Image (cartoon, grey):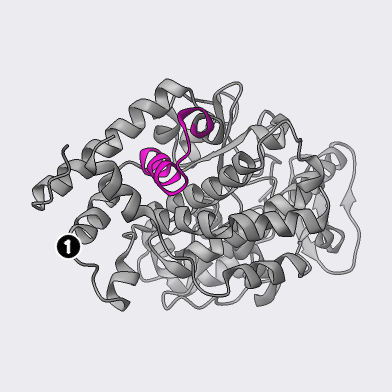
């Protein structure tokens, strides 16, 4: 893959990668830094890219890897996601606030799958390829994460049912 | 598909900040600040028992007999560490000739996990001398094998770097490197999770690498811990 093609791809996916990173890290600057680091890693490894792999899978896995490792570091430092941003930005209204809090209670792997699924509409197979897990694990993790968010919506008085 | 899906889809959609694409393009055009090239600035002194000193600047390796093997191993592991391909050292160190207090300090410094930092006073507390932060600083300053025994992971309580034998700029770059190097890497085909730098991890192809935040997270999605590098010991 040549430089120009990669730049075009980076431009095309930047917004979606950012959305995933933001929902994982809860902080704008950290999300942008994560996207940048992920793209730089892919750029450095572009010679080993195989067209057998979907470009989207490659890029999403890179950003997922960076975000997950950043969460590991935060866990060790005992930081709470969203704390910094919450202090700076006006609080989101209604169910957004409930969901932001509820998302923190969702286990990391399930949270990552939720973000990839809802930001990009990715299917089970692609999610499984991105995180290197089985399709059945994807389904169970998504169901688990969604149940936690749904419970938060209902507790907040926002009916999420049919 | 229910209303929850619509709500979640709306919630997860985030507006990217203005100028993101331009900033990313610019970042791709900048030269990466690779540390690999610094390997030539390091040289080691090795005894039969292990690495006795690690020096930075001009000089050459000093080793004889079995020490030569230790020196070669140290050089290779250092190169991998500086290249972001290793998070731990297995080369033996020879700390003979240092005092008991310094040995305890260095032993405790060696327990600070990759990518984390602690303060001088915290380290003093951990070795049972809570009022000896300054003495701990002196003991770390005289660390004969910096980087391998990671005294760069000890900083002042106010967050500033403090003294570093190889200079503050290098301490910054080492901490930056550790901040951007993942610790736990899983292999998508074998479903085994290793520490970055394990011989098994180094065989994972670029497209089979999955990073995890903990061994428990990896186990939750069907991965098991490597029996060689034992990642559970390195990441809680």
Q: Nearer the viewer, residue B147 or A57?
A: A57
Q: Chain of mark 1?
A: A
Q: Is residue A158 left or right of residue A20?
A: left
Q: Nearer the viewer, residue A144 or A12?
A: A12
Residue at horizontal 36%, vertical 38%?
A110
Q: Nearer the viewer, residue B9 or A97?
A: B9
Q: Tell me which corner region of the image, top left, top right, bottom left or bottom right, holds residue B56.
A: bottom right
Q: Is residue A24 left or right of residue B28?
A: left
Is residue B223 covered in magenta?
A: no
Q: Is residue A71 left or right of residue B85?
A: left
Residue B150 in sight in this render: no
Q: Which portion, as a residue range, is magenta?
A: A108-127
Q: Secondary structure at mark 1?
A: loop
User: Is residue B68 placed above or below A71 in the rendered structure?
Assistant: above
Q: Is residue A160 left or right of residue B143?
A: left
Residue B99 x %, y %: 58, 58
Q: Nearer the viewer, residue A53 or B234?
A: A53
User: Is residue A38 placed above or below B32 in the rendered structure?
Assistant: above
| Quadrant of the snapshot with the N terminus of chain B | top left
For label 1, the residue is: A94
């Amino acid at each position: 893959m040549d430089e120009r093609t990669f730049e075009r791809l980076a431009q095309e996916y930047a917004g979606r990668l950012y959305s995933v990173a933001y929902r994982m890290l809860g902080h704008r600057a950290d999300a942008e830094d994560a996207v940048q680091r992920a793209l730089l890693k892919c750029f450095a490894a572009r010679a080993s890219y195989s067209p057998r792999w979907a470009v989207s899978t490659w890029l999403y896995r890179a950003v997922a890897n960076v975000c997950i490792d950043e969460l590991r570091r935060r866990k060790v430092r005992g930081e709470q996601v969203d704390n910094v941003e919450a202090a700076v930005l006006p609080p989101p209204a209604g169910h957004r606030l409930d969901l932001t809090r509820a998302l923190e209670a969702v286990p990391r792997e399930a949270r990552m799958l939720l973000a990839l699924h809802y930001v990009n509409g990715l299917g089970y197979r692609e999610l499984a390829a991105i995180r290197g897990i089985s399709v059945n694990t994807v389904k169970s993790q998504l169901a688990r994460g969604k149940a936690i968010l749904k419970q938060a919506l209902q507790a907040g008085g926002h009916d999420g049912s049919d | 598909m229910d209303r929850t899906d619509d709500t979640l889809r709306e919630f997860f959609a985030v507006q990217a900040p203005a100028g993101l694409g331009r900033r990313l393009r610019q970042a791709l055009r900048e030269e990466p600040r690779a540390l690999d090239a610094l390997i030539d600035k390091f040289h080691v002194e090795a005894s039969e028992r292990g690495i006795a000193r690690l020096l930075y600047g001009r000089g050459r390796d000093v080793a004889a007999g079995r020490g030569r093997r230790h020196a070669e191993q140290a050089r290779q592991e250092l190169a991998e560490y500086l290249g972001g391909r290793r998070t731990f050292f297995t080369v033996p160190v020879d700390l003979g000739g240092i005092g008991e207090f310094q040995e305890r300090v260095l032993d405790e410094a060696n327990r600070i996990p990759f990518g984390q930092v602690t303060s001088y006073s915290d380290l003093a507390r951990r070795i049972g001398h809570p009022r000896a932060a300054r003495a701990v600083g002196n003991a770390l300053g005289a660390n004969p094998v910096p980087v391998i025994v990671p005294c760069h992971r000890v900083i002042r309580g106010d967050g500033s770097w403090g003294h570093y034998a190889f200079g503050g700029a290098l301490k910054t770059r080492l901490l930056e490197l550790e901040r951007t190097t993942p610790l736990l890497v899983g292999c998508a085909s074998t479903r085994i999770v290793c520490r970055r730098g394990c011989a098994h991890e180094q065989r994972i192809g670029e497209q089979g690498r999955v990073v995890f935040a903990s061994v428990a997270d990896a186990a939750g999605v069907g991965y098991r811990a490597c029996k060689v590098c034992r990642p559970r010991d390195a990441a809680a």
